[in-house]
Amino acid sequence: MASRTRTARIAEEIKKVVSTMFIGGIKDPRINSMVSVTDVEVTNDLRYAYVYVSILGGDFDSTMEGLKSASGFVRREVGKNIKLRYIPEVIFRVDDSLEKGMYMEELIRSVTKDD
């Protein structure tokens, strides 16, 4: 089993590689330039890497389709840049923490407004 610090280092390296790929490496027209990597979680057995992305502007569904279809290419590029015995399968997920934060802020405002 990989240690906690090793998985964190690998996750950070994957985040760097995928972030630079969004700047100029992925040529899919469905993926706009307003996609950013917010976090990467790697499982303890290093088989899966969950890449959390924030999508600002553009068509949400088509961007997610483009990311899903590009996951094999992203995995290959991660393998070229990071030397690992097994390259984790890249799974893209939407980071909805911004929406959750706005919702919580609205709830707090509504409670303090009534007082």
Image: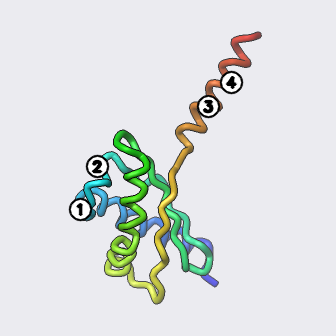
**Residue denoted by label 1:** 27
**Residue denoted by label 2:** 33
Horizontal arrangement in the rendering, residue 82 relative to residue 113 (left or right): left
Q: Counting other residues with Cα less than 10 Å from the Cα at mark 2, is it few (<14), some (14-19), or many (20 or more)?
A: some
Work out whether 1 lies above or below 114.
below
Q: Nearer the viewer, mark 3 or mark 1?
A: 1
Q: Which mark is residue 108?
A: 4
Q: State the residue in front, 97 or 70.
A: 70
Quick one: label 4 or label 1, which is nearer the N terminus? 1
| Amino acid type, label 3 | Tyr
Quick one: label 3 or label 1, which is nearer the N terminus? 1
Q: Nearer the viewer, mark 4 or mark 2?
A: 2
Residue sitting at 59 percent across and 36 percent down? 101
Horizontal arrangement in the rendering, residue 114 relative to residue 89 (left or right): right
Q: Counting other residues with Cα less than 10 Å from the Cα at mark 1, is it few (<14), some (14-19), or many (20 or more)?
A: few
- Give SS at disc 2: loop
**Residue denoted by label 3:** 103
